[in-house]
Image (cartoon, grey):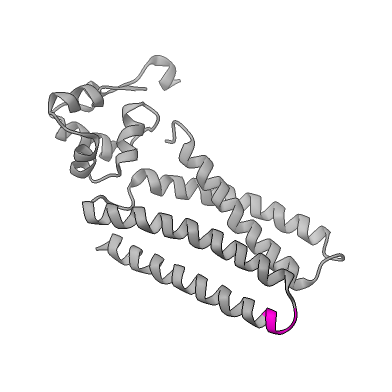
Amino acid sequence: MKTRIKELRARFDLTQEQLAKKVGVRRETIVFLEKGNYNPSLKLAAKVARILNSTIEEIFIFDDSDLE
Amino acid sequence: MRSKVKFILLLITLVLVVIGAGIFSINLLVLGKSTVPVLLIIVMIFLAGILSAFLRKFYYDLKAGIPSDDERTEKIRMYAAGYAYFISLYVWIILLAFHKYLDTDDILIIGLIGMAISFGVSWLLMKLKKGIA
């Protein structure tokens, strides 16, 4: 899974900590999400998408291999 | 609020661990046993060190308004508990196999420490694992 969190976060001029605070998670969770090393729940994905003013599909990109 | 309660509970645990292990060690020393108290004090210092480092981080997070738990930490804990449960079963089975060579007290202490270590190791591995779903 790839994510565009880092790119969108930079667009909104947010640090990882600021985003973490807004979403209500720990900073490490944002780090793992940015690297695509954590599959978030639908609720968390929706929260991140809402804060970054995007849709879930725009932020979390799944390859065919991820869905197998 | 939940984080504050958790912080206070951890602080109380740390104090109780130190006091409890201290009293236990003094009692054993009075009884003339010296190996176990020394071992216990080393374990206690190690545990207290880990707990105080954890508490320090917890305190700064609390001050910064960062939650102590989120869905990832809860998943990590859940997975770790699951793995630790199965590892603990094996620990107890192995200990039962050696029950003729060990005292009941020793079996209980080793078993409980084994359970705690298995949870700690599982938690650490889960924390570093990529792609937790």
- Asked whether, in this view, residue B108 is left or right of residue A41, the answer is right
What is the chief secondary structure element of the magenta stretch? helix
The x and y percentages for residue B16 are: 48, 74
Residues drawn in magenta: B28-32
**Residue at (38, 59) in percent of width and height:** B55
Q: Nearer the viewer, residue B53 or B99?
A: B53
**Residue at (16, 30) in percent of width and height:** A52
Vertical order, B58 against A68 (above or below): below
Which image quadrant is residue B23 in? bottom right
Vertical order, A57 against B1 (above or below): above
**Residue at (60, 54) in percent of width and height:** B117
Residue B31 included in the magenta stretch of the image: yes
Q: Nearer the viewer, residue A41 or B26?
A: B26
The x and y percentages for residue B44 are: 56, 65
Q: Quadrant of the C terminus of chain A?
A: top left
- Asked whether, in this view, residue B31 is left or right of residue B112, the answer is right
- Asked whether, in this view, residue A47 is left or right of residue A36, the answer is left
The x and y percentages for residue B11 are: 39, 67
